[in-house]
Amino acid sequence: KAGVTQTPRYLIKTRGQQVTLSCSPISGHRSVSWYQQTPGQGLQFLFEYFSETQRNKGNFPGRFSGRQFSNSRSEMNVSTLELGDSALYLCASSPGDRGGNEQFFGPGTRLTVL
Amino acid sequence: AQTVTQSQPEMSVQEAETVTLSCTYDTSESDYYLFWYKQPPSRQMILVIRQEAYKQQNATENRFSVNFQKAAKSFSLKISDSQLGDAAMYFCASQGGSEKLVFGKGTKLTVNP
């Protein structure tokens, strides 16, 4: 099976712009979760989508949003970028049908905000 | 709410030796799962080992094993016969009631030849 893929791998944006990141889960996985990784805050949960519905949400401002398509691919959008949004954004997929599933992570998208 | 604490920001071990990484957690969930993930310098996060909290038996995966002390809310990872490829950031994580993983800050493991 192909692993989780994320595009693009690297992005450079300026403050005030918006950005869209994409995640393709492992075939058959219906849950996609997004995490932000920074040196200061570590790994923080953004949100999880399951069958095109946001099922869980972390403690991030409304500038961070996402969606999931019928093929389980997910996108994450950040509007009005701030310097503090510079981070590695990881997505993870799992079957999502029960607790304790292993989550499979993608390689991440490195976002730099100038 | 769930919290995960890794008190060792960095650890080092000699090749072929054994090292133990510490993790404590707190959760209000009665049914939860605990994980150790490894993130090598290439950044791809991979699962090392998984423990179901309702199972008393400690999980083992080849050279990796855990010491799960439920009452103490402790979940340490033991790596035996350390190899150069074990060098990475190791994250302890908990999951309860949803797909959300709560991670610790991580422990950077260096393996010395």
Image (spheres, coloured by chain):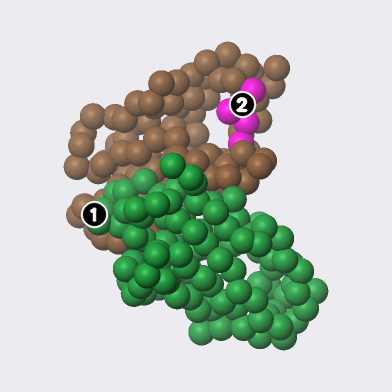
Chain colours: A green, B brown
| In the depicted structure, whether residue A11 falls above or below residue B35 | below
Q: Secondary structure at mark 1?
A: loop
Above or below, B27 relative to B63: below
Q: Is residue A37 visible?
A: no
Q: Quadrant of the N terminus of chain B?
A: bottom left
- Label 2 belongs to which residue? B85
Q: Residue at x 60, y 78 (%)?
A: A78
Q: Which residues are magenta?
A: B84-88
Q: Residue at x 20, y 54 (%)?
A: B30
> Which chain letter goes with mark 2?
B
Residue B74 on image: x %, y %: 36, 41
What chain does badge 1 belong to? Answer: A
Dominant secondary structure, magenta: helix
Tell me which residue sits at (77%, 78%) in the image: A14
Image x and y of residue B83, in percent: 59, 20
The relative height of residue A110 versus residue A54 in the rendered view (above or below) is above
Q: Quadrant of the C terminus of chain B?
A: top right
> Where's residue B111, x and y in %?
65, 25
Depth check, front residue: B30 or B48: B48
Name the residue that disc number 1 marks: A98
